Image (tube, rainbow, N blue to C red):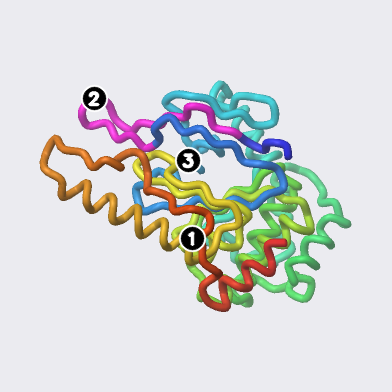
Amino acid sequence: MNTAIEAIDLVKDYGNGENAVHALRGVNVAFEQGRFTAIMGPSGSGKSTLMHTLAGLDSATGGHIMFDGADITTMTDNQLTMLRRHKIGFIFQSFNLLPMFTAEQNIIMPLTLAGEKPDRAWFDLLVTTLGLKQRLGHRPNELSGGQQQRVAIARALIARPQLVFADEPTGNLDSVSSAEVLSFLRRSVNELGQTIIMVTHDAVAASYADRAIVFADGRIVADETDPTAERMNQLLMQERERATRQSLAPAGAQSPSAGAGVPLPPQSARNTRAGAHAATAGRHRR
């Protein structure tokens, strides 16, 4: 399978000297085309920094990011703007819909701003897949939270981007709406061939993905294929326990696992999905 985007020895520091914060510590990771990847980790782990840096929203301190045959770390601000406009889509926790416009107008807004007309066949396929055909004339305040996020997903996909970044897309939704939105993200990969990289705190959300990466202290500490909610919760708990042990260690001492990530149990130790919500994720993955 072809690579959509790849980080090579990626470093991101904030500040200098002793006060520097090392958000990314030489990260090496490749994301495949047509796959749904989740990135998890505790607050401050570096997962959001990775997404922002991959998307060119933040600059790298060192290393390279290869996307569409080019190293985006060498691009100018104008080049990055054009890259994001034409090749990258974004889905945020807050829907960021314009309240005075209808759902249809919000969906095609990126094309309107670029002076382009939508491909009506693609538009129809999107709104049908996302279940929005009967809601196109509604304004955001006439839509539920789940429907608003579906409009935001359609807006992210309308320009047929090569890659979509989703930053906590279910963070403002209840469990029912979250399952609905995650199912549509899953379908956009399965049925539309989309490539999605999603940052989330939610292990159930991660279970909808083909792959889940756990971040801690600016490094990847686990990389799971066909993740389950139970497995991801287990990994996150192990990482929290490791961080707690490290914080309680005497000054100058370091836990044997510090910086190396959590110990991963054998493949046979994985359990089945936890709860009906996670079971739904498994049914939608394929």
- Under mark 3, the amino acid is Leu
Identify the residue position indicated by label 1 in the image: 269
- Residue 249 picture quarter: top left
Say which of 125 and 137 sits in front.
125
Identify the residue position indicated by label 3 in the image: 50
Q: Is residue 254 visible?
A: yes
- Residue at 69% in and 39% down: 87
| Relative height, residue 95 to residue 217 (above, below) | below
Identify the residue position indicated by label 2 in the image: 17
Q: How many discs appear?
A: 3
Return the residue found at the far left. 250
- Residue at 64% in and 67% down: 282
Q: Quadrant of the C terminus?
A: bottom right
Tag 1, which secondary structure? helix
Residue 146 x %, y %: 60, 72
Residue 50 x %, y %: 47, 40
- Under mark 1, the amino acid is Ala
Q: Which residues are magenta?
A: 6-23
**Majority SS type along the magenta span:** strand
Which is closer to the viewer, label 3 or label 1?
1
Q: Which comes sooner in the sequence, label 1 or label 2? A: 2
- Residue at 63% in and 39% down: 84
